[in-house]
C-alpha cells in the first residue's frame, strides 16, 4: 500500500485537516512480477531450439562443397541471425537474473581497478578492430563497495557502447574519482552523441536513438537497461551527459 498525505488549509492558512490518499499497488506488483516471469521463461524456452538451428546450420556449412554458392550465402545469413537472437536472449535472461537478484548479492569493499582491468581486457579486441584507443586516467587504488560481476557488467556495457558509437581513430576515456562518499567511474567518448530529447528514455528496454544503426552494430537495445538495474541493485546510479556530434559521458556512481 502506498500512501501520500497533504495538509488541507482554509482561509488565512488555518489548518482544516489532512488529506490522506492510499493506493493499493498489489495488482501493479503482481503484473510486474508476471511480466518478469514471462520474459525469463520465454527467453529460456527459446534457447534450446536456437541451439539446434545453430548446430544444424554449422554442420551444413562444414561441408560447403556439397551446397551451391547461393545456398551457402543463405545459410550464412541464417547463422548470423541465429547468433544475433542468441545474444538478445542472453541479454534478456541476464536482465531477469538481475531483477530477481535482490538480496543475494556479494557486496564487498574492493578496489575498482580490478574491475576496470577485466573489462578492458574483454573489450580490447573490439576497440582494436574499430581503431578506437582506450585511455585510463584518474585515481588509483580507490575502494568502493560492490559485487564485482555486476559492476563489471555495467562497465563492459558502457565501454562497448562507447566503442560502438565512436568514429575510427578516436579515444574513449575511462576515469575514476572519489567524489564525497562515493566513487565515480566515467566513460567518455568522442562519438556521435545523443540528442537531448532521447536522454529521458535511454535506459528503457529496447529504446534506441537510431534503431537501424544499433542493429547494424550488433546492439540488442538492452545494454543500458542492464546498466540501470545493476546500479540500482548496487545502491548507486548511472548518469549521462551528451552533446550531439561531440560525444557522451556516462558516469557510474558507486557507494563506498
Ligand atoms: P544498443 O544495444 O542499441 O547499443 P543500449 O541499451 O546499450 O542498446 O543503448 C541504447 C541506445 O542509446 C543505443 O541504441 C544508442 O542509440 C544510444 N547510445 C548508447 N550509448 C551511446 C554512446 N556512447 N554514444 C551514442 N549513443 C549511445
Image (cartoon, rainbow, N blue to C red):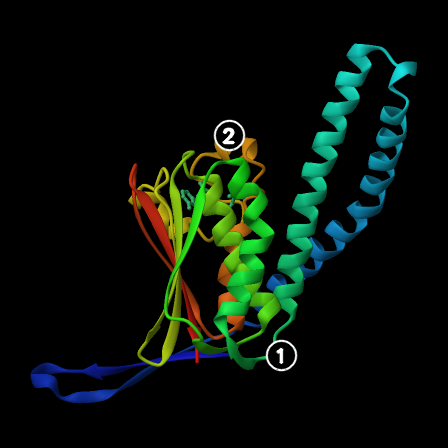
Inspect this view and state whether residue 222 appears. Answer: no
Cβ–Cβ below 8 Å for labels 2 and 1? no
Q: Which residue is mark 2?
A: 212
Give x and y (percent) for residue 70: 78, 11
Residue 237 is drawn in which quadrant? bottom left
Q: Is mark 2 within 8 Å of ligand 1?
A: no
Question: Residue pushed farthest left?
Answer: 12
Relative to 153, is 245 above or below?
above
Q: Nearer the viewer, residue 231 or 256?
A: 256
Kind of element beneath mark 2: helix
First along the sequence among labels 2 and 1: 1
Q: Residues within 10 Å of mark 1 (few under 14, many from 20)?
A: few
How far from the left and from the top, in percent, is residue 65?
90, 15
Q: Which residue is mark 1?
A: 106
Q: Is residue 167 above or below residue 8?
A: above
| Residue 227 appearing in the image | yes
**From what the image shows, is residue 41 above or below residue 33?**
above
Q: Secondary structure at mark 1?
A: loop
Amino acid at each position: 500500500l502506498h500512501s501520500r498525505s497533504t495538509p488541507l488549509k482554509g482561509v488565512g492558512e488555518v489548518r482544516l485537516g489532512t488529506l490522506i490518499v492510499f493506493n493499493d499497488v498489489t495488482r501493479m506488483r503482481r503484473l510486474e512480477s508476471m511480466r518478469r516471469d514471462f520474459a525469463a521463461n520465454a527467453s529460456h524456452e527459446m534457447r534450446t531450439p536456437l541451439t539446434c538451428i545453430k548446430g544444424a546450420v554449422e554442420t551444413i556449412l562444414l561441408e560447403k562443397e556439397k551446397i551451391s554458392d547461393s545456398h551457402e550465402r543463405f545459410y550464412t545469413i541464417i547463422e548470423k541471425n541465429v547468433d544475433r537472437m542468441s545474444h538478445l536472449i542472453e541479454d534478456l535472461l541476464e536482465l531477469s537474473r538481475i531483477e530477481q537478484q535482490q538480496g543475494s548479492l556479494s557486496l564487498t569493499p574492493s578496489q575498482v581497478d580490478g574491475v576496470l582491468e577485466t573489462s578492458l581486457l574483454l573489450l580490447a579486441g573490439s576497440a582494436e578492430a574499430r581503431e578506437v584507443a582506450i585511455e585510463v586516467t584518474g585515481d588509483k587504488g580507490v575502494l568502493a563497495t560492490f559485487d564485482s560481476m555486476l559492476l563489471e557488467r555495467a562497465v563492459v556495457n558502457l565501454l562497448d557502447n562507447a566503442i560502438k558509437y565512436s568514429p575510427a581513430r578516436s579515444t574513449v576515456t575511462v576515469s575514476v574519482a572519489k567524489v564525497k562518499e562515493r566513487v565515480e567511474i566515467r566513460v567518455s567518448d568522442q562519438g556521435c552523441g545523443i540528442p537531448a530529447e532521447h536522454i529521458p528514455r535511454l535506459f528503457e528496454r529496447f529504446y534506441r536513438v537510431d534503431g537501424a544503426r544499433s542493429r547494424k552494430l550488433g546492439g540488442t537495445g538492452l545494454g543500458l537497461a542492464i546498466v540501470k538495474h545493476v546500479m540500482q541493485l548496487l545502491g548507486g546510479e548511472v548518469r549521462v551527459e551528451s552533446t550531439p556530434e561531440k560525444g557522451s559521458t556516462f558516469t557510474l556512481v558507486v557507494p563506498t
